[in-house]
Amino acid sequence: MARAATTADAFNAVAEPRRRQILDALTAGERPVNDLVAELGLAQPQVSKHLRVLREVGAVDVRHEGRQRLYRLNGQALKPIHDWVKDYERLWSERFEQLDVVLEELKKEEGDVSVN
Amino acid sequence: MARAATTADAFNAVAEPRRRQILDALTAGERPVNDLVAELGLAQPQVSKHLRVLREVGAVDVRHEGRQRLYRLNGQALKPIHDWVKDYERLWSERFEQLDVVLEELKKEEGDVSVN
DNA sequence: TTGACATATGCTTATATTGGCATATATGCT
DNA sequence: AGCATATATGCCAATATAAGCATATGTCAA
């Protein structure tokens, strides 16, 4: 068995740095392919291919306008990634470290005075 | 050129669902390989291989204890993923939608009374 | 219609992957 | 030493990738 297809889900689609760059560029709003080609300095066919992958996982939508295709971000598709990774935030965030300190304090008090 | 190695960075390592399961399982704390084998219902060699990938991107650490190897989570390695994806949260989060409403209000007021 | 522009698709090459199975390595026990 | 347990590694097969380049498709304009 080979690696899962890049189109299998957002996790796989977004593992490719260029595709993240494309999404980042689309944060500025809807844009035609050639805009992205210019901004990222990639060959046009590769950009089209990356966009196809992103479209297949729902991370972008297209709108035809004349001979241009305007791609637009659909961040919704990235929610599963955020949902998964956010639970790990406590492992590096200072905010959570301080929360842990507070919880420790509470535990100690509980032991001392038998708070219920 | 082929796809980037799974060990290239956390994004690639975590694209594989089984590896995410392993990390999730390690949230409960340090555990020996066979624990994970039992919990995930995978073959032992595959688990060892997945753990190797996770180790190579720094997502887990190992500690030898007798003939066991205790793997422990190192969430720090997932921070880049969180950092990247969190900026997209506004695209689906209600919290941000409400923020947008507030900002709209402010803009309107600004037009009305020329607040500075 | 002919041509220019915008984008998508097809083909090739080099490469890495995952699972399965066998086996190596390391440690502990008797 | 000899054996069992815990884990890692090696090899195979099947598959999917990404870049490069050529070319097809679609649209507008003269």
Image: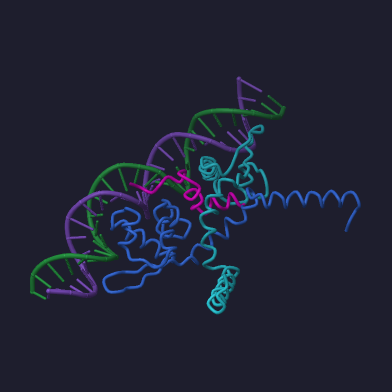
Chain colours: A blue, B cyan, C green, D purple
Q: Position of residue D30 (x, y in %)?
A: 12, 74
Q: Which image quarter: residue B97? A: bottom right
Q: Position of residue A85 (x, y in %)?
A: 57, 55
Q: Residue at x 45, y 67 (%)?
A: A74
Q: Which image quarter: residue B48? A: top right
User: Residue extending furthest right?
Assistant: A113
Of residues C9 and A36, the one nearer the viewer is: A36
Of residues B44 and A74, the one nearer the viewer is: A74
Q: Is residue B22 magenta?
A: yes
Q: Residue at x 53, y 77 (%)?
A: B111
User: Residue extending furthest bottom?
Assistant: B112
Can residue A1 be seen at all in this image of the molecule? Answer: no
Q: Is residue B100 magenta?
A: no
Q: Residue at x 51, y 62 (%)?
A: B88
Image: A27 above or below B67: below
Q: Position of residue B90 (x, y in %)?
A: 54, 65
Left or right, A8 with reference to B101: left
Q: Quadrant of the C terminus of chain B?
A: bottom right
Image: B56 above or below A76: above
Of residues B76 and D10, the one nearer the viewer is: B76
Q: Which image quarter: residue C11? A: bottom left
Q: Position of residue B2 (x, y in %)?
A: 35, 47
Can residue B67 be seen at all in this image of the molecule? Answer: yes
Magenta span: B1-24
Of residues A21 and A6, the one nearer the viewer is: A21
Total labels: the figure holds 0
